[in-house]
Image (cartoon, rainbow, N blue to C red):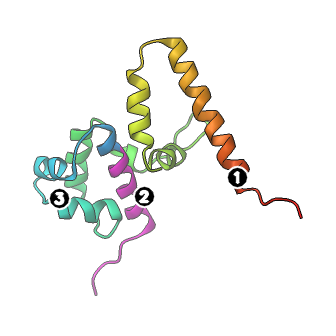
């Protein structure tokens, strides 16, 4: 009977996705660098296939993170899962990359204020109107 993937396999896949995108790599580029097809990278990222230890080591080297980054919780109060959860939101990595390119401190504060206001407006629109 074939081995089934687990929640850990899916977690590793989500972290591979977030770290790959943060490095600006395509699935094809990552696959080529570690010797697999982009389809195999897709399966890893979706948690459909397990990533072998040697291949995970190679992926961690390429993404410049320790292998433990795919598994461990952070000791600083939060968990890496929370961080990776934020990064898995559609557009989050692109937003962070664009934000990091803003050199003017005041402009950064203004952009942050706009995003916070938009987030509050989005939450208000989810609250049903009183009857």
CA separation in Å, label 1 and label 3: 39 Å
Residue at the far right: name it: 131
**Which residue in the protein does label 2 denote?**
11
On screen, residue 61 versus residue 10, left or right, reads left
Residue occupying image coordinates x 21% and y 52%: 27
Res. 125 mark = 1
Res. 70 mark = none
Mark before the other along the chain sequence, 2 or 1: 2
- Is residue 90 depicted above or below 99 in this figure? below
Q: Secondary structure at mark 1?
A: helix
- The 10 Å Cα crowd at callout 2, few under 14, some 14 to 19, many 20 or more, is many
The answer to whether residue 9 is magenta is yes
The quadrant where residue 44 appears: bottom left
| Numbered range of the magenta stretch | 1-18
**Which residue in the protein does label 3 denote?**
38
Residue occupying image coordinates x 36% and y 72%: 5
Task: List x then y, in percent, for residue 7.
Answer: 45, 66
Q: Quadrant of the N terminus?
A: bottom left
Comparing marks 1 and 3, which lies closer to the viewer? 1
Q: Secondary structure at mark 2?
A: helix
127 or 31: nearer the viewer? 127
Task: List x then y, in percent, for residue 52.
Answer: 24, 60
């Amino acid at each position: 009977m074939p081995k089934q993937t687990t929640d850990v396999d899916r977690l590793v896949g989500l972290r591979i996705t977030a770290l790959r995108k943060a490095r600006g790599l395509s699935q094809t580029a990552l696959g080529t660098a570690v010797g697999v097809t982009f389809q195999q990278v897709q399966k890893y990222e979706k948690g459909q296939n397990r990533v072998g230890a040697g291949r995970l080591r190679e992926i961690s080297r390429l993404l410049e993170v320790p292998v433990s980054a795919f598994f461990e919780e952070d000791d600083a109060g939060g968990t890496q899962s929370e961080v990776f959860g934020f990064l898995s939101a559609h557009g989050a990595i692109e937003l962070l990359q664009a934000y990091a390119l803003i050199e003017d401190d005041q402009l950064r504060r203004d952009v942050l204020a706009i995003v916070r206001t938009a987030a509050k407006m989005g939450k208000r629109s989810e609250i049903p109107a009183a009857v």
